[in-house]
Image (cartoon, rainbow, N blue to C red):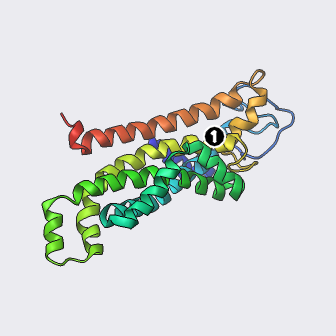
Amino acid sequence: MLAVYALVAVFAPWIAPQDPNAQDLLAVLERPSATHWLGTDQIGRDMLSRLIVGTRFTLAAALLSVTIAGAIGVTLGLVAGYSGGRIDAAITGGVDLLLTIPNLILAIAVASVIGAGLTGLVIATTASFVPPLARLVRGRVLEIRQEDFVAAAISSGTRRARILARHILPNAVTVIVIETSLLAGQAVLVGAALGFLGLGVQPPAPEWGTMLGAGREFIEVAPHLVLVPGLAITLLVFAFNMLGDGLRDRLDPKFRN
């Protein structure tokens, strides 16, 4: 499923049957037909074309935000878990403070300050995912730091940066990969929620959350305006969650039979 989404995002301009922003005021709110397979929206734009092109915005925002959050969260978790003392207390205190705020509320607050748009969407989603990642990585680093091979590396005079890169990080990769794959699904939901509230990618860009927000006023007369992007979001989140569960079952020894 993720491969299909990725291929659609890459080849969207060639797959889309029509211009996603082309208006046809004589075909407003049409139901699915042979001409428009998924119907048209409130100003006559082809829903299938908008859904296909919108895959780029939704998938890119989710993957970019998770990648950036992963880089920042992993760095903070490594430094806090290995350094200990005041550095650990300072980082952990900040992370715990942010963890008291629900992800979506934090994302809305950040997006409201930065402003609507793709940049604001990515930054808001990233900010909401850094604290849980940092907390998770810190806990894993505390476990690895007690291992004999780390103690041997410290005794041999190995530099801290080398220990983190050669001994700590490789043994924490499994947890990081599983968590980021699960967070990608959450990133899709957060991005769609921000778009629905008008804080995400702005029209006429066909981002799925924005399409949901624009179609909610016509749900009684044209339910396909909500069902089409809603189903696309649901399937993408399901695919990321299944990927995370599969990676956990295969990579985490605790879940192996």
Residue 149 versus residue 229: which sits nearer the camera? 149
Crowd class of label 1 (few under 14; some 14 to 19; many from 20; radius 10 Å): many
Query: Quick check: 36 above or below 173?
Result: above
Left or right of residue 164, residue 220 in this image: right
Q: Secondary structure beneath disc 1?
A: helix
Quarter of the image for the N terminus: give it. Answer: top left
Seen at 30% across and 41% down, the residue is: 248
Q: Quadrant of the C terminus?
A: top left
The residue wearing badge 1 is 193
Residue furthest toward the top?
Answer: 220
Residue 136 visible in the shown view: yes
- Locate residue 121, reporting x and y percent: 63, 53
Q: Residue at x 38, y 41 (%)?
A: 243
Residue 50 shows in the view: no
Q: Amino acid at mark 1?
A: Ala
Q: How many marks?
A: 1
Q: Residue 9 in the image: x percent, y percent?
A: 55, 49
Q: As rendered, which of 66 and 207 lies closer to the eye?
A: 66
- At x 71%, y 41%, the residue is 197
